[in-house]
Image: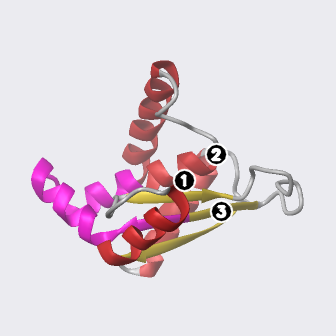
């Protein structure tokens, strides 16, 4: 995935979320790299598709209000999930990028069905915007 395309898509998502000055990093990893992060930071075993590290949480969240955090996407898992779902790689990548960015904004799909539904709705809206 070319860097400029990823940057353009991320900027479009930030603009749509009314945060054009937001800063984030996007790390494109393989399954080995993301599995190491998954174990080290989330105490989970094995690779996953996307991990978001939000910087707007915790006691130091107000130090740099524009610094949103990091989104790590496994290109290996993205490719596998795209194939399994009958999607193009870029379509699945867009979904994961949006998903990770939404986590940086506090969206959650784990703790309640209502929050999960809201995150899914917003994710679909933003994915259509950048696809």
Residue 86 is left or right of residue 96, and the answer is left
The residue at which mark 2 appears reads as 105
Q: In 3D space, how far apart are the residues under numbered discs 3 and 1 (Cα atoms)? A: 9 Å
**In x, y percent, where is residue 122?**
48, 35
Q: Secondary structure at mark 1?
A: helix
Quick check: is 83 in the magenta stretch?
yes
Q: Are marks 2 and 3 in contact (CB under 8 Å)?
A: no
**Residue at 32%, 63% in the rendered image:** 46
- Specify few, some or many for label 3: CA neighbours under 10 Å numbering under 14, 14-19, or 20 or more: many
Mark 3–mark 1 CB contact (< 8 Å) = no
Query: Circle 3 is placed at which residue position?
Result: 69
Residue range (magenta): 71-96
- Residue 131 visible somewhere in the drawing: no
**Quick one: label 2, few (<14), some, or many (20+) residues within 10 Å?**
some
Q: Quadrant of residue 41?
A: bottom right
- Is 18 part of what is drawn in magenta? no
Give the labeled residue for mark 1: 101
Residue 3, quarter of picture: bottom left
């Amino acid at each position: 995935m070319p860097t400029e395309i990823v940057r353009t898509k991320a900027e479009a998502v930030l603009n749509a979320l009314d945060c054009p000055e937001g800063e984030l990093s996007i790390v494109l990893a393989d399954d080995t790299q993301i599995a190491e992060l998954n174990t080290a930071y989330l105490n989970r075993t094995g690779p996953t598709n996307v991990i978001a590290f939000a910087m707007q949480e915790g006691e130091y969240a107000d130090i740099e209000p524009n610094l949103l955090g990091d989104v790590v996407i496994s290109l290996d898992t993205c490719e596998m999930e795209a194939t399994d779902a009958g999607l193009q790689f870029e379509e699945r990548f867009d979904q994961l990028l949006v998903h990770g960015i939404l986590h940086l904004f506090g969206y959650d799909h784990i703790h309640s069905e209502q929050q999960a539904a809201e995150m899914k709705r917003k994710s679909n809206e933003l994915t259509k915007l950048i696809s």
